[in-house]
Image (tube, grey):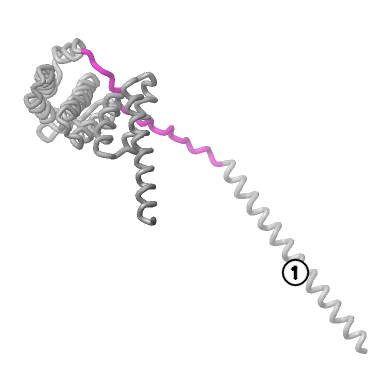
Amino acid sequence: FIYSVKKEIEEKEKLKKKKEQQKQSKDVKKEEKKEEKELEEEVKQPEKSKEAPKPNIQLEYKQLSQEETKKYIIEGCNAKIQQAVQLKEQGDAALKEKDYKKALSNYAKVFIYVNGFRGTGEQLQYTDKGELKELSIEESKIVSDVKYKTYLNMAYIHIQEKEWQKVVDKATKSLETFITVKGLYRKALGNFELGNLKEAEEDLVKALQMEQGNSDVIQKLKEVKAKRKQNEKDSINRIKAAFS
């Protein structure tokens, strides 16, 4: 009797286990069919057209000759730009005469006329009587040309006056408009004198990448590295002295 009861229990367990396995098998098949259906629907759907990423258009600033600048002005560009160009030329003339005060005065006035032009595309924008307008590509190039050169010349004057923070500030402004070897070099000079050796070295390395044979950049980079090395030695010696 005990044997028959035990056997009956085992049969029930086997039957229960079999049903569970069948159920699991059905669930798996159901899941597989669901995935197949989803895949079929995905294939049937037409591919969504992907928009090509918009290029990050930036104005290619090139150095304009005096003839090009005059040509565009004669052809009738914005009156503010004409005034800015004239003021820069007056500043350049004063700079040649080493009249730094007069040169800086004229250069500062340049930005009264060009700071209203803004944007990063090929054509700068400005507001005229509440209306947003665009400069032509040629006018935009002149504005950028005038801005970066004026800041560069101001940085040069501050170098002569040994006003090192102003050198860094003006050179940085120039580089924000157009990256040049002169801009990087002058910014590095200012930072070197201010003791910002890491920043000076970084800008000199960039300048050397742009113009590998520039002797001024090479010489200043050597000075900066030597100064940094000496500073490290001095720092170690001070620490040793403190614990001796």
Give percent across and percent down for residue 217.
33, 25
Residue 142, by quadrant, is top left
Tell me what residue is drawn at x 63 percent, y 54 percent. 34
Give percent across and percent down for residue 71.
18, 11
Residue 2 left/right relative to 21: right
Give percent across and percent down for residue 7.
89, 81
Which quadrant of the rendered structure holds the N terminus? bottom right
Residue toward you, 85 or 6: 85
In the picture as drawn, the residue positioned furthest to the bottom comes out as 1
Residue 61: say if magenta. yes
Tell me what residue is drawn at x 23 percent, y 19 percent. 138
Q: What predominant SS class does the magenta segment belong to? A: loop
Residue 222, by quadrant, is top left
Residue toward you, 215 or 44: 215
> Is 234 placed above or below 101 here?
below
Residue 71 left/right relative to 224: left
Residue toward you, 142 or 121: 142
> Is 72 placed above or below 184 here?
above
Tell me what residue is drawn at x 82 percent, y 73 percent. 15
Q: Amino acid at mark 1?
A: Glu
Give percent across and percent down for residue 132.
17, 32
Does residue 79 appear anywhere in the picture?
no
Residue toward you, 84 or 20: 84
The residue that disc 1 covers is 20
Tell me what residue is drawn at x 88 percent, y 83 percent. 6
Q: Which residues are magenta?
A: 45-65
Residue 6: say if magenta. no
Q: Find numbered disc 1 in the image and state the secondary structure of the residue it sits on.
A: helix
